[in-house]
Image (cartoon, coloured by chain):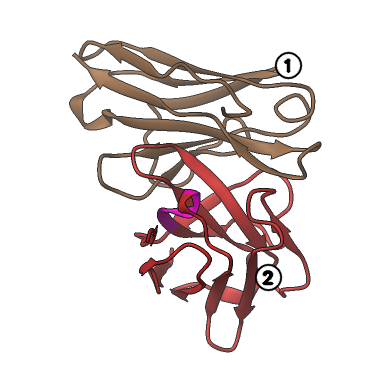
């Protein structure tokens, strides 16, 4: 079925940067789109970004567009989320999730999730 | 405020059947399939239903999903305490060009 392990979460000041990583195992990594989904403390789920299996297509929520960049290294079975110009409202648990499909567009069917990595933006 | 509307809470007694609704619009549920996620306390979400009514392997058949027009629903039969969790609906929104979630429904087994 597969496993995902996120890392890179930390306490960062407003305006700062952070790079999250998600290492995948147990499935053919380059055959599936990958996404980041976040959950602010005590709140619901919010989609952040998606990248297709090849990395050719990327999608972003309006709330992070222009500040966050998703990428992947299929040789290392890893997906990344570069987060710049961080704001207090970016504070959340960030989950990495595997899509059941290759392109990542269309109805979100995330069938493998990591345990999340915590990002706290505060001075 | 979430694009998809769910009741914040639902409850039932052991053995009972409960349904959780998810309301959207023509740009999301009306034109795309709906998926449901279960999030047990302190854990990551889990895909429960995809493509409106399909269960991934390992999901018991007491979970079922349906969709009609711009609304969808998740039904859980034979309630047991182990299904106490937050449940989220999700779909693609053609206007926003991305996935959207409901606000989540906290299910309590009384």
Which residue is at a point 61% across and 83% down the rendered structure image? A74
Which span of residues is magenta-colored? A89-94
Which residue is at a point 55% across and 74% down the rendered structure image? A80
Q: Residues within 10 Å of mark 2 (few under 14, many from 20)?
A: many
Query: Horizontal and vertical percent for residue A23?
Result: 45, 76
Q: Quadrant of the N terminus of chain A?
A: bottom left
Q: Residue furthest bottom?
A: A75
Do the numbered discs 2 and 1 sit on residues whose CB atoms are within 8 Å?
no
Query: Among the chains, which one is brown?
Result: B
* Magenta span contains residue B97: no
Q: Quadrant of the C terminus of chain A?
A: bottom left
Query: Horizontal and vertical percent for residue B103?
Result: 49, 29
Relative vertical location of residue A114 with respect to residue B78 in this rendering, above or below: below
Query: In the rendered view, does B34 fall on the left or right side of A120?
Result: right
* Magenta span contains residue A93: yes
Query: In the rendered view, does B106 fall on the left or right side of A64?
Result: left
SS label for mark 2: loop
SS label for mark 1: loop
Compute the Cα span from label 2 to label 1.
31 Å
Query: Among the chains, which one is red?
Result: A
């Amino acid at each position: 079925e597969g496993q995902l392990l996120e890392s890179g979460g930390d306490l960062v000041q407003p305006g700062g940067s952070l790079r999250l990583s998600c290492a995948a195992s147990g499935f053919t990594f380059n055959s599936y789109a990958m996404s980041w989904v976040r959950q602010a403390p005590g709140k619901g789920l919010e989609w952040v970004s998606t990248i297709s299996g090849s990395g050719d297509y990327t999608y972003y929520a309006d709330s992070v567009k222009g500040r966050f960049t998703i990428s992947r290294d299929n040789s290392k079975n890893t997906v990344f989320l570069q987060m710049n110009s961080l704001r207090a409202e970016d504070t959340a648990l960030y989950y990495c999730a595997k899509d059941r499909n290759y392109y990542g567009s269309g109805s979100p069917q995330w069938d493998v999730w990591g345990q999340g990595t915590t990002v706290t933006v505060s001075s | 405020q979430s694009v998809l509307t769910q009741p914040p809470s639902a409850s039932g007694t052991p053995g009972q059947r409960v349904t959780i609704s998810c309301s959207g619009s023509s740009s999301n549920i009306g034109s795309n399939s709906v998926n449901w996620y279960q999030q047990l306390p302190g854990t990551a979400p889990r895909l429960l239903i995809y493509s409106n009514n399909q269960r991934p392997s390992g999901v018991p058949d007491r979970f079922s999903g349906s969709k009609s027009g711009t609304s969808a629903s998740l039904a859980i039969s034979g309630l047991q305490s182990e299904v106490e969790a937050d449940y989220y609906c999700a779909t693609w929104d053609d206007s926003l060009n991305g996935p959207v979630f409901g606000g989540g429904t906290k299910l309590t087994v009384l």
